[in-house]
Image (cartoon, rainbow, N blue to C red):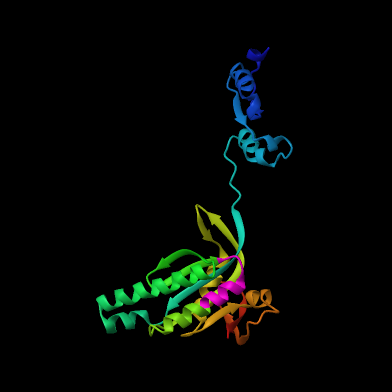
Amino acid sequence: MLPTIRVPTLVLYRPKDRDQMLDLAGRIKGAHALEIEEQGFSAFAPMTREVEAFLSGREAAPVPDTMLATIMFTDIVGSTERAAKVGDRAWRDLLRDHHTVVRRELARFRGRELDTAGDGFFAIFDGPARAISCARSIVGGLGELDLEVRAGVHTGECELQDGKVTGIAVNIGARVAAAAGPGEVFVSGTVKDLVAGSEIEFQDKGVRELKGVPGEWRLYAAA
């Protein structure tokens, strides 16, 4: 009977049934066989994309992975002018010391470095209080090297794509940092609300427009 089947066929099977089901699929002309993890038969969701692709004839669009994270950006203020003033060799030494301080504080407060572009760092944390404390320690530590930095902290839902953290929350975090002045740690209203009840104090810096981000945003400086 199996060789007489002439319609598109998808055979789903569990690992323990592999040999029998592959033999069955082999008896149906043009059949596709797909192995599903054991939980797949109790929760159909893991099979959805494969079934959709089979029925429609095209690969289903992947659903992006997301995560809630606290984003921190830091940046040296006036880096171009400082580099021109001290010269290339001295600037390289300063950047090396800068990176050492930032990475030391990231390790101390359990932050994860995601990117560094010259004199700026992009890192994420699993909580806003640690991110603020880390940013303040970085500002203080680099002040001892006569380097003025600014930092910004925001919490939001991020997308994970090809191992990279992206999304509007990342853009907001970068713009919050850009709004800060030398030696300042700016946070979004979201972050301020999340750490309510902590010992962290804030100074209202007013409502700002963040480049490329819709709406107006009230920003605060962490004291």
Residue found at x 34% / y 79%: 80
Residue 1 can be seen, yes or no: yes
Residue 27 image point, x, y percent? 61, 16
Residue at (67, 79) in percent of width and height: 198
Q: Is residue 149 left or right of residue 89?
A: right
Residue drawn at (54%, 70%), measured in percent from left and top?
109
Quarter of the picture holding the N terminus: top right
Q: Can the viewer see residue 214?
A: no
Tell me: residue 157, above or below residue 207.
above
The answer to whether residue 22 is above or below residue 106 is above
Q: Is residue 119 left or right of residue 126?
A: left
Task: Please state, as top left, top right, bottom left or bottom right, where the C terminus lies in the image.
Answer: bottom right
Name the spot of residue 114 as percent of width and height, x first.
47, 63
The quadrant in which residue 128 appears is bottom right
Extreme-front residue of the structure = 108
Secondary structure that dominates the magenta span: helix
Closer to us: 27 or 132: 132
Magenta range: 125-135
- Is residue 133 on the magenta stretch? yes
Q: Position of residue 195 (x, y in %)?
A: 66, 76
Residue 14 image offset from top left, x and y in percent:
66, 29
- Would you say residue 111 sits in the magenta stretch? no
Along the line of sight, which residue is nearer the eye, 124 or 53? 124
Q: Is residue 156 above or below residue 90?
A: above
Q: Nearer the viewer, residue 160 or 49?
A: 160
Q: How many marks?
A: 0
